[in-house]
Amino acid sequence: MMANKDHVAMLKRDIGAWNTWRKEKPEILADLIRANLGGADLSEADLGGADLIEADLGGADLRRANLGGADLSGADLGGAYLGGADLRGADLIEANLGGAGLSGAYLGGANLSGADLIGANLGGVDLRGAYLRGADLIEADLGGADLGRADLRGANLRGADLGRANLRRADLGGADLGGAYLRGADLGRANLSRADLRGADCVKVILFNTSLTDVDLSSLVNASIDHQGPSTIDHRSIARSLHCTNLLPFLVATDMPNVVATYLIDAVKSLDPNGLFNLMHSTFISYGGPDQDFAERLQSALDQNGVRTFLFTKHAAWGETIQGAVRSGIHSHDRVVLVCSESSLTRAGVQHEIELTLRRETKEGGTKLLIPVALDDYVWHGWEPDNSDLKDEVLERVIGDAEGADTNQTKFDQTISRLLGALKVSS
């Protein structure tokens, strides 16, 4: 529906009359879709709940206007004056607010997902609980703004001014904060997982229960930070920050025990150039064709956790004989994880892989290399291989309970956790 020209003309001409009329005829608010209100003086206009989808409000004077709950998705508000305007709960998805003056505006709970806020003046603005996911805030002024609990996931904040901003409990996961000014910002309980902080000014930033996983910590490590409590840092952040000379004291300042921080740094340093954890046993995965999907998930999860793996379908060299690839894989890896199910244990190839592993154990003086993981109870009830010694050898070991792990994610995660424990190299 296109905007009614009479309504638009009245809105431009006489705000007082408009405010009176809109109370008597609230249905006229739906007549402002794609309205041309560019440059209009709409200060103190009552547009609460108005349907202004894709309306042209570029350069308009909307100071102290009521736009609470209005639908401004896709609207052009570039260069508009919105000081003191009430935009609480407004829908501004993909709206253009580039260069808009928003100082003193109320934007709590507004949906600004994907909005263009490049260079916008948002200094001191109330943005509590606002949705700014994927918003473009390059060089925007957010100094002193209240962004508590705001959703800023994936937002582009390169070069933005966030000095003294309240970002408590804000979600900045994956946000680009490169070169941003964050001096004195409160990041208590904020999520900065995968955020880019390179080149950001983080002097006097407040950290408390802040999530800093998979982050290059250099901008924080090299600044004077106000640590008000523990924060969460993972091995990926440590790996990305090994070049920082002050990494150890920074980790300790986040409430990590010195001995733990030292060990983690040393452990991450032990990663070889290919990212393989030298503290984990390399692993050959033995399985039957019907269990290939599970085996591939297993291999991927182990690989992500630093375990060098061999999965026939992924690592066997083309042109090599099947037997040669299997034999080489078993003998060049520290452990053999055996997927135990009716689908796998009945396969001649899997039984041959068990035999090769047991022979290697004998040759190496009885070292236990085989780690059985059961997807069903067939290994205990029903499996009768031609070589009965295979069953005896498997059953004398602690068999991992992975029943349901091929279909249940929680069970799969538990299986990986226990398996990683079994694959750790003893000190």
Image: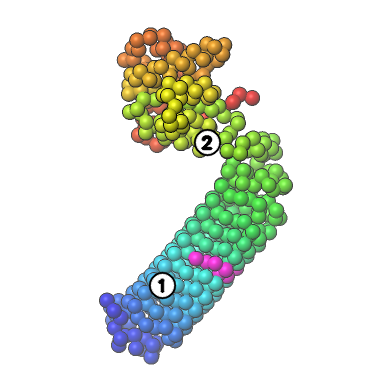
Kindly report the secondary structure that dominates the magenta region of the rendered protein: loop
Residue pushed farthest top? 388
Give the colour scheme of this rendering. Answer: rainbow
Picture residue at 66% right of the left edge, 44% below the top: 242
Q: Which residues are magenta?
A: 136-143
The vertical placement of 65 against 172, above or below, is below
Element assignment for label 1: loop
The vertical placement of 22 against 240, above or below, is below
Marks 1 & 2, CB-CB < 8 Å contact: no
Q: Which residue is mark 1?
A: 68
Q: What is the distance, in whole Å, between disc 1 and disc 2 at their CAs?
A: 48 Å
Picture residue at 57% right of the left edge, 68% below the top: 139
Q: Quadrant of residue 6?
A: bottom left
Q: Which mark is residue 30?
A: none
From the image, state whether disc 1 or disc 2 is nearer to you: 2
Q: Nearer the viewer, residue 146 or 267?
A: 267
Picture residue at 49% right of the left edge, 23% below the top: 328
- In this rendering, position of residue 68 left or right of residue 166: left
Picture residue at 40% right of the left edge, 12% below the top: 391
Is residue 246 visible to the viewer in this orientation of the structure?
yes
Residue pushed farthest front? 319
Q: Position of residue 336 (x, y in %)?
A: 48, 22
Element assignment for label 2: loop
Q: Which residue is mark 2?
A: 305
Q: Is residue 141 magenta?
A: yes
Q: Closer to the N terminus: mark 1 or mark 2?
A: 1
